[in-house]
Image (cartoon, helix red, strand yellow):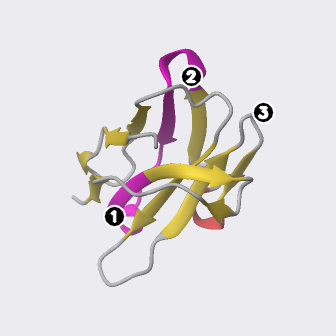
Amino acid sequence: QVQLVESGGGLVQPGGSLRLSCAASRSIFSDDMGWFRQAPGKQRELVAGITSDGRTRFADSVKGRFTISRDNAKSTMYLQMNSLKPEDTAVYYCTRMLGLTLIIGSWGQGTQVTVSS
């Protein structure tokens, strides 16, 4: 079972940027991966996913603002978040997926992102 650790969250003003990292305890070169978020009182939702061969999927709410990438040599996945909005405030999690729709991994502690002036 791979262990995933999220980092890079913080407090940022609207319009700002953050880069989240998801570090894995083993190689993830053959894994499909995804970023999810959960805001208070809301269900966890897919933000972005990336397959082992580089195909991506984004939630409509973040298209054009967020990018997802992976560095298999470092066993790390990233989420670059630009033009952040208050509604992006949430705890962000990474996990393993099957394709870009099915969640097959467990959840870590997540990283808090707060967008506020």
Q: Is mark 2 on a helix, strand or loop?
A: strand
Where is residue 29? Give x, y as percent: 64, 27
Which residue is most to the top? 73
Q: Residue type at mark 3: give it.
A: Asp
Q: Is residue 84 left or right of residue 5?
A: right
Residue at which label 3 appears:
53
Q: Earlier in the sequence, mark 1 or mark 3?
A: 3
Mark 1 vs mark 3, CA separation in Å: 28 Å
Residue at 30% x, 38% y is: 8
Residue at which label 1 appears:
90
Mark 1 vs mark 2, CA separation in Å: 24 Å
Q: Residue type at mark 2: give it.
A: Asp
Q: Nearer the viewer, residue 115 or 105?
A: 105
Q: Residues within 10 Å of mark 1 (few under 14, many from 20)?
A: many
Q: What element carries label 3?
A: loop
Where is residue 117? Give x, y as percent: 21, 58
Question: Is residue 86 inside the magenta stretch?
Answer: yes
Mark 2 vs mark 3, CA separation in Å: 12 Å
Q: Residue type at mark 1: give it.
A: Ala
Q: How crowded is mark 2: few (under 14 residues within 10 Å), some or many (20 or more)?
A: few
Q: Which of marks 1 and 2 is nearer the N terminus?
A: 2
Above or below for 22 versus 94: above
Q: Residue 71 carries which label?
A: 2
Residue at 23% x, 46% y is: 10
Residue at 78% x, 33% y is: 53
The magenta segment = 71-93
Where is residue 70? Give x, y as percent: 58, 29
